[in-house]
Image: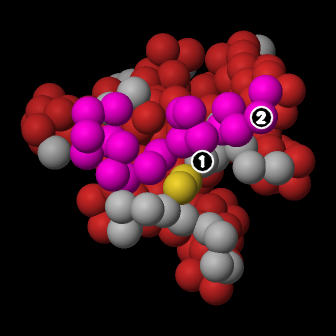
Amino acid sequence: KPIVTYFLIVLCIIVFVVSGLVVNTTLYGANVGYLIKQGEIYRLFTSMFLHAGIIHIFLNMYSLYIVGPKVEDFFGKWKYLLIYLISGISGSLLAVALNTDSIISVGASGAIFGLLGALLYFGYHYRVYLSGVIKSQIIPLIILNLIIGFVGTSINNLAHIGGLIGGVLVSMAVGVKYKSTKTDIINGIIM
C-alpha cells in the first residue's frame, strides 16, 4: 500500500485547511526569495506543503495520488520520501535562484515533478519493459505541464524544472535495486 503517498496527501490537506482558517498563514511558510536570502531557510521545505487555492491543491493532490504510488512501489517507502522531499527543496532552490526576490511560490508540484523525474530514471534502467510508457505517457505529461507552466502567469515553472532535475539526481543517488552501479550512486550523491 502506498502509505507514504497517502500520508503526504493528508498532510497537505491538513495544512491547507489550517492555513485557510488563519488569515495569511500561507505567507508564513511560502517560498519568498528575499526572506530566504535573509535566513528563513525553512521556507524551502514548508512551501511544498502549502497551496494557494482549492483548485491548486486538488490538481496537485490528484497528481500525487496518480504518480506517487508508482514511485513508492518502484523505490520503496524511504527512498520515495527522500526523493519527494529533496525534489521539492530542489524546486524551491531553483525558483529562489532564478526568480525575482518578490515572487511568492507555494505548492507540491516541484516535488511531484521530482517524482516524474524518478520515473524517468527508473524507466531508463527498465527500458525494455517501460520504454513505451515512458515515451507515450511520462515524457508527454512532463512536456505538456512545462508548456502550461510557461503559458500560465501564476505558475512557477522554475520550481517544476528544479524538482524534475532534483528527482532524477536523487533517484540516481538512492539507486535502483539490482540495476544501479556504485559509480551511478556516487555521481548522483555528488551532483
Q: Does the image show residue 127?
A: no
Magenta part of the protein: which range? Answer: 22-40
SS assignment at label 2: loop
| Residue found at the very far front of the displayed protein | 23
Amino acid type of the residue tagged 2 in the rendering: Val
Q: Residues within 10 Å of mark 1 (few under 14, many from 20)?
A: many
Q: Considering the image in quadrants, where does the N terminus appear? A: top right
Image coords of residue 184 (percent x, y): 18, 40
Image coords of residue 66 (percent x, y): 78, 43
Residue located beneath label 2 in the image: 23
Q: Nearer the viewer, mark 1 or mark 2?
A: 2
Examine the image and state in which quarter residue 136 appears.
Answer: bottom right
Look at the image and say whether residue 153 sits in the magenta stretch. no
Residue located beneath label 1 in the image: 106
Q: CA distance from mark 1 to mark 2?
A: 16 Å
Q: Residue at x 87, y 54 (%)?
A: 55
Q: Does the image show residue 49?
A: yes
Q: Looking at the image, which is closer to me, 173 or 153?
A: 153
